[in-house]
Amino acid sequence: MPNNDLNEVCSVSRQAQKLGLSRSRFYQLQKVGVFPLPVYCIRTRRPIYPQNLQMVCMDIRKRGIGCNGQPVIFYSARDSEKEKPCRNSDVAHKKIAVALKNMGIKATTTEIRKAINTLDTKGVAPDSLDGAILGKLFNYFNQERQNGV
């Protein structure tokens, strides 16, 4: 690892980010002895990683052998673009409206929002374009149409 990627000191969050891990996962691995414990700033009492510990952490990530001598398997990061649901619910509701329209169902974003709130959508993010939620919405609006509501 080039030295220009190392700071004089960095926080636990920044160190976890450099390693491609979440802060909670970094703490888990630290607790079982994979990564070294940080040093603490006397003045602020915050945990920090000086350059030498940053290099140790990077080496552990690269080699796959922890401070405790145990092998560690680090999985590659997920493709965040594919797995993140759409955070803007208005955009998501518009996408759902277009998908439903292609299926022969005309519904406004307001109607879609109300339907999502009334349907059992546990385990399905209401702001994602998901097949399960589309199926439930299709059935919901198709039933309304058949009942003449």
Image (cartoon, grey):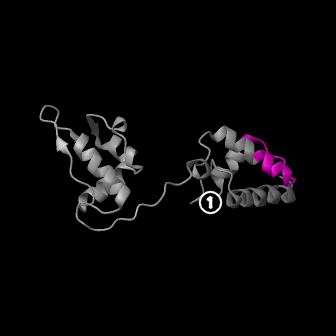
Q: Amino acid at mark 1?
A: Asp
Q: Which residues are magenta?
A: 97-110
* Residue 50 place in picture, x, y as percent: 23, 40
> Furthest-front residue in view?
2
Residue 59's place in the image compared with 64, above or below, is: above
Question: In the image shown, does 58 or 29 lie closer to the viewer?
Answer: 58
Question: In the image shown, does 130 or 122 lie closer to the viewer?
Answer: 130
Q: Is residue 101 magenta?
A: yes
> Furthest-left residue in view?
42
* Left or right of residue 96, residue 47 in this image: left
Q: Is residue 100 magenta?
A: yes
In which quarter of the view is residue 11 placed? top left
* Left or right of residue 105, residue 114 in this image: left
Q: Secondary structure at mark 1?
A: loop
Question: In the image shown, does 17 or 71 lie closer to the viewer?
Answer: 71
Q: Is residue 141 visible?
A: yes
Q: Residue at x 27, y 51 (%)?
A: 56
Residue 108's place in the image compared with 75, above or below, is: above
The residue that mark 1 highlights is 120
* Residue 77 place in picture, x, y as percent: 49, 54
Q: Residue at x 62, y 44 (%)?
A: 86
Tell me the quarter of the image containing the N terminus.
top left
User: Dot 1: few (<14), some (14–19), or many (≥20) neighbours within 10 Å?
Assistant: few
Q: Residue at x 68, y 39 (%)?
A: 91
